[in-house]
Image (cartoon, helix red, strand yellow):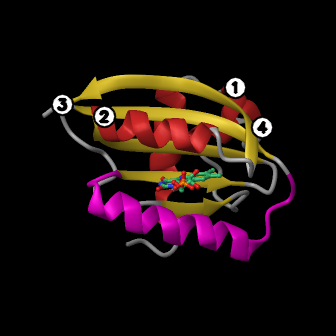
Amino acid sequence: MQIVRLIYHSLASYNLSKSEIKQIQQCSSQFNAINKVTGMLVYDNLRFLQLLEGETVVINDLYNRIVNDKRHNCVQLVHFGELNNRRFTEWSMGVAYMPVSKKTFVESKYGGFFPDKFNAYEATRYLQEVREFAVESM
Ligand SMILES: Cc1cc2nc3c(=O)[nH]c(=O)nc-3n(C[C@H](O)[C@H](O)[C@H](O)COP(=O)(O)O)c2cc1C
């Protein structure tokens, strides 16, 4: 069974409240845990950056649903590729609110959280660097 990683960024359709983000997280954690999807979502009141790891068919179907979700738009695929080992095994969907005080490698390079500027390597590295700020896993 092939495992893939998918990364995208998008723009929130409006300023989603914390409880709306929590709703996304709860629904995501449930579906993702059942379907062995791992990953992380970062939100800064304006932009989303999400990384998903899982079986090819599951990730494809999930991405189609996510793209059609009216809570965000301008969904841009950054990366879709096969992988040998998952990097985000601790989260069925970790959520981190940016900005945080930590200066990450990528933030130092771009002067802030600008996921539209990140390439696949930078997006993955950014998510790894901020994973300690993620809240409420499974
Ligand atoms: C930014 C964002 C990230 C999302 N991430 C996930 C996710 O990881 N897993 C998931 O099941 N749903 C996620 N959702 C919710 C889906 O878009 C969708 O609402 C949910 O899968 C239910 O789909 P349905 O209404 O077609 O059944 C996310 C939504 C948004 C806006």
Question: What residue is shown with label 2?
Answer: 57
Report how far apart the C-alphas of labels 4 and 1 lie in the structure. 11 Å
Dot 4 or dot 3: first in sequence order is 3
Mark 4 or mark 3: which is in front?
3
- The residue lying at 50 percent from left, 67 percent from top is 27
Q: Which residues are magenta?
A: 14-37
Give left or right: position of 30 versus 20: left
Dot 2 or dot 4: first in sequence order is 2
Query: Disc number at residue 2?
Result: 3
Question: What residue is shown with label 1?
Answer: 117
Which secondary structure, mark 3?
A: loop
- Which percent across, then down, holds residue 88? 34, 51
Crowding around mark 3 (Cα neighbors within 10 Å: few <14, some 14 to 19, many 20+) is few
Dot 4 or dot 1: first in sequence order is 4
Mark 3 or mark 1: which is in front?
3
Report how far apart the C-alphas of labels 3 and 1 lie in the structure. 29 Å
Which secondary structure, mark 1?
A: helix
